[in-house]
Amino acid sequence: MARGFHGRVGAFRVRPGIRRPVRHAERRDLTRPMRPLRLLAIAGLVAFTALAIAACSAGATPAWTYAPAPPATPTPSPAASASAAPSAAASASVAASPAASGGATAGTTLDLTAQNIQFQETTLQAPAGQAFQIQFHNADAGVPHNVAIEDASGTVLFKGDIFSGVDTKVYDVPALPAGTYKFVCQVHPNMVGTLTVGP
């Protein structure tokens, strides 16, 4: 046996200047500081996995946001039907009423122009028993004119509003029986024409 050993393996005498061998138990103690590093690595892996799962689930559309498509023909509510009825009636009345100015309607529209204090058209013709319109153009700037319709006795059957030119108004004339009438400007009695109402 080598000098310095006392009969047990691993037991020896320490001499000055000679490095003492490290026993097996002491070697095991040197690995203990490595355990926290392993724990940190495991914790990092778990955190990375959790983040990856969270990112994937965040991109997915949750089922509770699904909304079914509305039906192709929605069923109207009673309130909507009630409100739609007056609006439909209003639309019908607007369509049936004559245009305020210049627009053609379903009936007859006669064009009449006043210029230089006289009617440009001296004869007009309208259907009997039907309402009609006169689109009256006042081409005299600053001069008032109107159109009135009189029967043979001079009774005024229709009187349009007096207005100054240059402007245009549409008069709604009620139905007249067949016959011959006179149209006149009530501001300038010399402005006279003949209106024939017939079939």
Image (spheres, grey):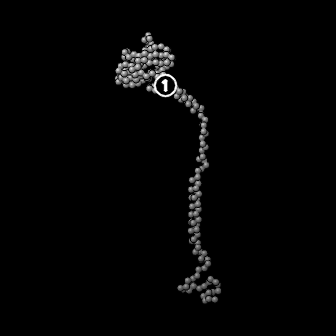
Q: Dot 1 lies on which element?
A: loop
Instruction: Tell me, yes or no, if residue 163 can be seen here.
Output: no
Horizontal and vertical percent position of residue 47: 57, 61
Q: Residue at x 43, y 22 (%)?
A: 111
Instruction: Tell me, yes or no, if residue 123 can be seen here.
Output: yes
Name the residue nearer the viewer: 9 or 108: 108
Name the residue nearer the viewer: 29 or 136: 136
Dot 1 alpha-carbon crowd within 10 angstroms: few under 14, some 14 to 19, many 20 or more? some
Compared to residue 34, the image places residue 141 above or below, namely above
Name the residue nearer the viewer: 39 or 156: 156
Q: Seen in the image, is 32 located left or right of residue 94? A: right
Compared to residue 191, the image places residue 78 above or below, namely below
Compared to residue 49, the image places residue 122 above or below, namely above
Q: Name which quarter of the figure residue 82 lies in.
A: top right
Name the residue nearer the viewer: 108 or 13: 108
User: The N terminus is located in which quarter?
Assistant: bottom right
Marker count (numbered): 1
Which residue carries the number 1 mark?
A: 105
Q: Residue at x 43, y 15 (%)?
A: 194
Residue that protrudes farthest toward the top in the picture: 153
